[in-house]
Image (tube, rainbow, N blue to C red):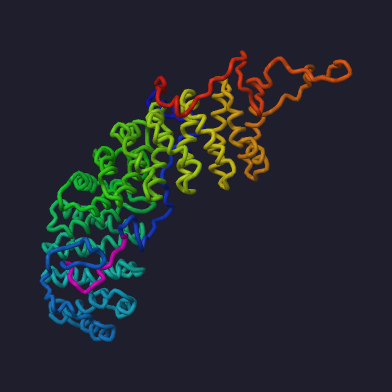
């Protein structure tokens, strides 16, 4: 039997199939985020009249070398009233003419005003083809820079397609190899805006060969600003569903891994955040994608940044590590061995809801693994106790992920692990039964069914525990649920674990005792393994009191056999 067959067989051992247990984030379409992407913009405007070398209101952390453009001249802003004259100059003047350069600069200034730039008016003036042509005029890097800047601001809006349709992608890619770093940076910025608009435009940029010169600009950056913008652009090239072909983007992985491990002052927190987002996009997919990213040996550094890195990097890091543990067992184990479970505790208490949610999702994927991997969570007493609490009281989105963690431990754990989790876990799962979410109700029912099965096998009074958690009333109410799958599951659980034997028992016949009737007490237990009672009994079949697990007291000494 080959290894693939072994993996397939292992998948069917669980009560819940592996796809349900291990879940990847599935963004059904590319989101064009006009506002924030964990403090990063997918589109950015050079929305001021200063050259790229000066401080920018769109991204105050970006600082580059001073442009040759005269600073006093830059204070001048062109107005919409000047557009007809500027457009006429652009249409009739040769690229080499000083008047042509000034006209392109005037258009750029117009597009750089912070409020209501006249973008549509510029497009309708018919100047874009000539501005695109300016990108190819290598004799004047100032003209290339001004043209790229103007196109960047158009591409940052809903009119990105106008830049693409005029044929600007190929000239912009050529500009990434310019001797002038300002031209390379502005071209990269514009390409990032184009790639951030849609998966179609992203793929066109990749097909134009943009990735190689972008990576070259990471390897030999002229300044911090150029590096920051190029890293952001590469991150945009990884985004979106459907994903880009792995072969089209994997060439960036060594450079990204290098930046992640580089602790120099040139690599800012913003760059690390963009690198982490790029890795999260790149690793979101099948096991081959996951393995490709993991082989760059980024997991240890990502895990260390969970503790030492800024808040902005935590969400993409947890997302990336969550992708890793959604893969095969050996991929999950690699993340565990790198120490991820030593760092997740504080994340479950983080002020940001999304970080708490993503951390629970990561843990749910580990909990869908092998008994050894489940035990790695179980041994983290404070982590598991927090998860049990969150499964009952956290905000809805966070709570759902915590419920998956608990359910996956129940459905995939060993009998010992299930018994250890039962006292706190049954309560948590019963709290889910009246949620207005059919999927989560089914997840809880799967968990409770497994707990009852294990309890029946080992003489545990889990029906009584469920009753004490108000679970019986909730199960009875679910018999009226409109979802057929839930109804069928509930009937099965009630019939097997809470149903009473309808056969008349002679011990219940009234006996005459003097002038009164007395009902006999059955000598045997009221429920058996075949038909346990709803109320349960606190004695075993031998009459000895049943030993209940105490979650707090019994937790620490548990080490199931592997």
Q: Does 93 sit above or below residue 428?
A: below
Residue at x-position 21% and y-position 57%: 228
Quadrant of the rendered image containing residue 333: top left
Q: Position of residue 170 (x, y in %)?
A: 24, 63
Quadrant of the rendered image containing residue 148: bottom left
Residue at x-position 24% and y-position 84%: 88
Q: Position of residue 407 (x, y in %)?
A: 49, 35
Looking at the image, the residue that sits furthest to the top is 542
Identify the magenta region.
41-52
Q: Left or right of 489: which side holds 348?
A: left
Q: Residue 25: within the magenta?
A: no
Residue at x-position 17% and y-position 46%: 262
Q: Left or right of 40: which side holds 255?
A: left
Answer yes or no: is residue 4 visible: no
Q: Does 315 sit above or below residue 134?
A: above
Q: Left or right of 196: which side holds 146?
A: left
Q: Position of residue 491 (x, y in %)?
A: 66, 34
Which quarter shows the C terminus? top left
Answer yes or no: is residue 497 visible: yes
Quadrant of the rendered image containing residue 477: top right
Which quarter shows the N terminus? top left
For the residue pair 231 and 115, the one nearer the viewer reads as 115
Residue at x-position 74% and y-position 18%: 521
Q: Main secondary structure of the magenta part?
A: loop
Q: Position of residue 431 (x, y in %)?
A: 55, 40
For the residue pair 9 and 325, the one nearer the viewer reads as 325
Q: Does 194 sit above or below residue 290?
A: below
Q: Residue 47: within the magenta?
A: yes
Looking at the image, the residue that sits furthest to the right is 515
């Amino acid at each position: 039997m080959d290894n693939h067959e072994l993996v397939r067989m292992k998948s069917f051992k669980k009560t819940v199939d592996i796809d349900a247990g291990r879940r990847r984030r599935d963004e059904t379409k590319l989101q064009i985020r006009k506002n924030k992407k964990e403090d990063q913009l997918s589109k950015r405007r050079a929305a001021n009249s200063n050259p790229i070398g000066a401080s920018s209101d769109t991204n105050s952390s970006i600082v580059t070398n001073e442009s040759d453009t005269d600073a006093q001249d830059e204070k001048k802003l062109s107005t919409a009233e000047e557009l007809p004259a500027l457009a006429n100059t652009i249409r009739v003047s040769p690229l080499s003419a000083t008047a042509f350069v000034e006209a392109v600069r005037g258009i750029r200034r117009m597009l750089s005003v912070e409020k209501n730039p006249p973008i549509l008016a510029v497009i309708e003036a018919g100047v874009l083809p000539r501005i695109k042509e300016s990108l190819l005029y290598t004799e004047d890097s100032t003209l290339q820079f001004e043209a790229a800047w103007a196109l960047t601001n158009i591409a940052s809006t809903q009119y990105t397609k106008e830049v693409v349709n005029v044929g600007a992608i190929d000239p912009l890619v050529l500009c990434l190899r310019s001797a002038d770093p300002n031209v390379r940076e502005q071209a990269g910025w514009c390409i990032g805006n184009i790639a951030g608009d849609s998966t179609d435009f992203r793929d066109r940029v990749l097909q134009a060969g943009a990735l190689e010169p972008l990576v070259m600009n990471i390897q030999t950056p002229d300044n911090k600003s150029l590096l920051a913008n190029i890293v952001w652009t590469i991150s945009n090239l990884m985004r979106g569903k459907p994903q880009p072909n792995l072969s089209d983007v994997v060439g960036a992985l060594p450079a990204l891994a290098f930046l992640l491990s580089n602790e120099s002052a040139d690599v800012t927190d913003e760059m690390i955040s963009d690198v982490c987002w790029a890795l999260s996009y790149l690793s979101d997919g099948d096991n081959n994608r996951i393995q490709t990213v993991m082989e760059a040996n980024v997991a240890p550094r990502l895990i260390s940044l969970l503790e030492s890195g800024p808040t902005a990097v935590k969400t993409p890091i947890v997302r990336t590590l969550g992708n890793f543990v959604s893969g095969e067992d050996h991929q999950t184990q690699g993340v565990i061995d790198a120490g991820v479970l030593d760092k997740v505790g504080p994340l479950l208490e983080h002020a940001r809801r999304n970080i708490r949610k993503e951390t629970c999702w990561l843990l749910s994927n580990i909990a869908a693994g092998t008994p050894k991997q489940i035990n790695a969570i179980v041994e983290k007493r404070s982590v598991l106790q927090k998860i049990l609490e969150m499964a009952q009281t956290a905000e809805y989105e966070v709570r759902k992920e915590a419920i998956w963690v608990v359910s996956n431990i129940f459905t995939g754990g060993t009998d010992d692990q299930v018994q250890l989790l039962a006292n706190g876990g049954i309560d948590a799962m019963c709290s889910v039964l009246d949620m207005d979410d059919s999927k989560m109700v089914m997840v809880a029912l799967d968990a409770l069914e497994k707990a009852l099965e294990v309890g029946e096998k080992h003489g545990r009074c889990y029906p009584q525990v469920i009753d004490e958690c108000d679970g019986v009333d909730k199960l009875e109410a679910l018999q009226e649920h409109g979802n057929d799958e839930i109804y069928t599951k509930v009937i099965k659980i009630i019939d097997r674990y809470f149903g009473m034997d309808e056969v008349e028992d002679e011990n219940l016949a009234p006996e005459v005792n003097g002038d009164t009737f007395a009902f006999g007490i059955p000598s045997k237990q009221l429920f058996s393994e075949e038909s346990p009672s709803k109320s349960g009994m606190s004695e075993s079949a031998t009459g000895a009191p049943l030993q209940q697990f105490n979650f707090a007291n019994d937790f620490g000494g548990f080490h199931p056999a592997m």
